[in-house]
Image (cartoon, rainbow, N blue to C red):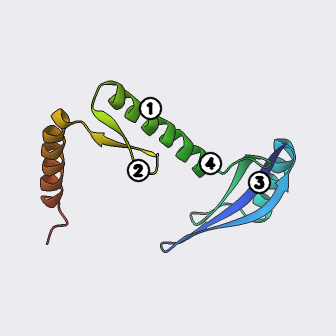
Amino acid sequence: MTVYLLEMLISTPERVVSETLGVYDTMRKAKSHLNKVENIRPETESVSFNILKFEMNDKPSILKMKEVAMQYVGEELFMMFHQGMLEQMVEPDGSFSYVVAGKFKGALEKAITRFHDSASDGPFEV
Protein backbone atom coordinates (compact mmCIF):
# COMPACT_ATOMS: atom_id res chain seq x y z
CA MET A 1 0.00 0.00 0.00
CA THR A 2 1.28 3.44 -0.92
CA VAL A 3 0.90 6.36 1.48
CA TYR A 4 1.60 10.06 1.00
CA LEU A 5 3.09 12.07 3.83
CA LEU A 6 2.46 15.81 3.96
CA GLU A 7 5.27 17.56 5.79
CA MET A 8 6.23 21.09 6.71
CA LEU A 9 9.94 21.95 6.63
CA ILE A 10 11.16 24.78 8.85
CA SER A 11 14.68 25.89 7.96
CA THR A 12 16.99 28.00 10.10
CA PRO A 13 20.74 28.53 9.76
CA GLU A 14 21.26 26.01 12.58
CA ARG A 15 18.87 23.22 11.54
CA VAL A 16 15.99 21.91 9.44
CA VAL A 17 12.90 20.62 11.24
CA SER A 18 10.41 18.30 9.54
CA GLU A 19 6.88 18.30 10.97
CA THR A 20 4.46 15.69 9.68
CA LEU A 21 1.09 17.30 9.00
CA GLY A 22 -0.80 14.26 7.70
CA VAL A 23 -0.64 10.87 6.00
CA TYR A 24 -3.01 10.06 3.10
CA ASP A 25 -3.82 7.08 0.94
CA THR A 26 -3.89 9.04 -2.35
CA MET A 27 -1.80 11.80 -3.84
CA ARG A 28 -5.01 13.66 -4.62
CA LYS A 29 -5.97 13.86 -0.93
CA ALA A 30 -2.45 14.90 0.03
CA LYS A 31 -2.44 17.69 -2.58
CA SER A 32 -5.90 18.84 -1.48
CA HIS A 33 -4.72 19.18 2.11
CA LEU A 34 -1.48 20.81 0.96
CA ASN A 35 -3.52 23.50 -0.85
CA LYS A 36 -5.62 24.11 2.28
CA VAL A 37 -2.49 24.41 4.45
CA GLU A 38 -0.84 26.81 1.98
CA ASN A 39 -3.97 29.02 2.06
CA ILE A 40 -3.64 29.54 5.81
CA ARG A 41 0.19 29.37 6.00
CA PRO A 42 1.86 30.38 2.71
CA GLU A 43 5.39 29.17 2.06
CA THR A 44 8.22 31.52 2.99
CA GLU A 45 11.99 31.42 2.76
CA SER A 46 12.12 29.45 6.01
CA VAL A 47 8.87 27.41 5.75
CA SER A 48 8.06 25.02 2.93
CA PHE A 49 5.78 22.04 2.35
CA ASN A 50 6.43 18.71 0.74
CA ILE A 51 4.59 15.48 -0.11
CA LEU A 52 6.60 12.28 0.25
CA LYS A 53 5.52 8.96 -1.25
CA PHE A 54 6.13 5.79 0.80
CA GLU A 55 5.36 2.12 0.38
CA MET A 56 4.02 0.66 3.63
CA ASN A 57 6.41 -1.70 5.43
CA ASP A 58 9.16 -1.08 2.86
CA LYS A 59 12.82 -0.86 3.88
CA PRO A 60 14.17 2.65 4.49
CA SER A 61 15.97 4.01 1.43
CA ILE A 62 19.28 4.16 3.31
CA LEU A 63 19.17 0.37 3.75
CA LYS A 64 18.39 -0.12 0.06
CA MET A 65 21.40 2.03 -0.87
CA LYS A 66 23.61 -0.02 1.45
CA GLU A 67 22.46 -3.26 -0.21
CA VAL A 68 23.23 -1.87 -3.67
CA ALA A 69 26.64 -0.65 -2.52
CA MET A 70 27.47 -4.02 -0.94
CA GLN A 71 26.36 -5.83 -4.10
CA TYR A 72 28.68 -3.58 -6.15
CA VAL A 73 31.61 -4.13 -3.76
CA GLY A 74 30.99 -7.88 -3.82
CA GLU A 75 31.02 -7.92 -7.62
CA GLU A 76 34.26 -5.92 -7.72
CA LEU A 77 35.93 -8.25 -5.23
CA PHE A 78 34.72 -11.27 -7.20
CA MET A 79 36.25 -9.80 -10.38
CA MET A 80 39.53 -9.21 -8.54
CA PHE A 81 39.48 -12.86 -7.39
CA HIS A 82 38.91 -14.11 -10.94
CA GLN A 83 41.71 -11.87 -12.25
CA GLY A 84 44.11 -13.43 -9.73
CA MET A 85 44.47 -10.30 -7.62
CA LEU A 86 43.09 -12.03 -4.50
CA GLU A 87 43.91 -15.48 -3.16
CA GLN A 88 41.53 -17.51 -1.02
CA MET A 89 42.84 -18.85 2.28
CA VAL A 90 41.23 -21.43 4.58
CA GLU A 91 41.48 -20.47 8.24
CA PRO A 92 41.96 -23.07 11.02
CA ASP A 93 38.27 -22.78 11.94
CA GLY A 94 37.27 -23.61 8.34
CA SER A 95 36.23 -20.07 7.36
CA PHE A 96 37.61 -18.37 4.28
CA SER A 97 39.69 -15.24 4.07
CA TYR A 98 41.26 -13.47 1.13
CA VAL A 99 44.67 -11.86 0.73
CA VAL A 100 46.20 -9.78 -2.02
CA ALA A 101 48.19 -12.01 -4.38
CA GLY A 102 51.95 -11.60 -4.10
CA LYS A 103 52.47 -10.04 -7.53
CA PHE A 104 49.91 -7.29 -6.73
CA LYS A 105 51.13 -6.41 -3.21
CA GLY A 106 53.79 -3.95 -4.42
CA ALA A 107 51.35 -2.05 -6.65
CA LEU A 108 48.80 -1.87 -3.82
CA GLU A 109 51.39 -0.63 -1.32
CA LYS A 110 52.48 2.11 -3.77
CA ALA A 111 48.87 3.16 -4.38
CA ILE A 112 48.17 3.33 -0.65
CA THR A 113 51.33 5.35 -0.07
CA ARG A 114 50.38 7.79 -2.86
CA PHE A 115 46.88 8.10 -1.39
CA HIS A 116 48.23 8.90 2.08
CA ASP A 117 50.80 11.33 0.66
CA SER A 118 48.16 13.19 -1.37
CA ALA A 119 45.77 13.24 1.62
CA SER A 120 48.43 14.82 3.81
CA ASP A 121 48.86 17.61 1.23
CA GLY A 122 45.24 18.61 1.74
CA PRO A 123 43.99 21.99 2.92
CA PHE A 124 43.34 20.78 6.48
CA GLU A 125 46.88 19.80 7.38
CA VAL A 126 48.36 21.64 10.37
Q: Nearer the viewer, residue 21 or 60?
A: 60
Residue type (three-letter) at the residue carrying disc 2:
Pro
- Which numbered disc, 3 or 2, marks the residue that appears first in the sequence? 3
Q: Quadrant of the C terminus?
A: bottom left
Q: What residue sits right under mark 1 in the picture?
A: 75
Q: Nearer the viewer, residue 49 or 101?
A: 101
Rendered residue at 53%/39% (across/down):
68
| Left-right relation of 63 to 69 | right
> Of tags 3 and 4, which is closer to the observer?
4
Q: Is residue 44 above or below residue 61?
A: below
Q: Quadrant of residue 117?
A: bottom left
How far apart are labels 2 and 4 at the CA level? Answer: 39 Å
Which residue extends farthest front? 92
Q: What residue sits right under mark 4 in the picture?
A: 61
Q: Secondary structure at mark 1?
A: helix
Q: What residue sits right under mark 2 in the picture?
A: 92
- Which numbered disc, 2 or 4, marks the residue that appears first in the sequence? 4
Q: Is residue 121 above or below residue 25?
A: below
Rendered residue at 49%/42% (across/down):
70
| Left-right relation of 102 to 94 | left
Q: What residue sits right under mark 3 in the picture?
A: 5
Q: Secondary structure at mark 4?
A: helix
Cβ atoms at labels 3 and 4 below 8 Å apart: no
Query: What is the count of numbered marks?
Result: 4
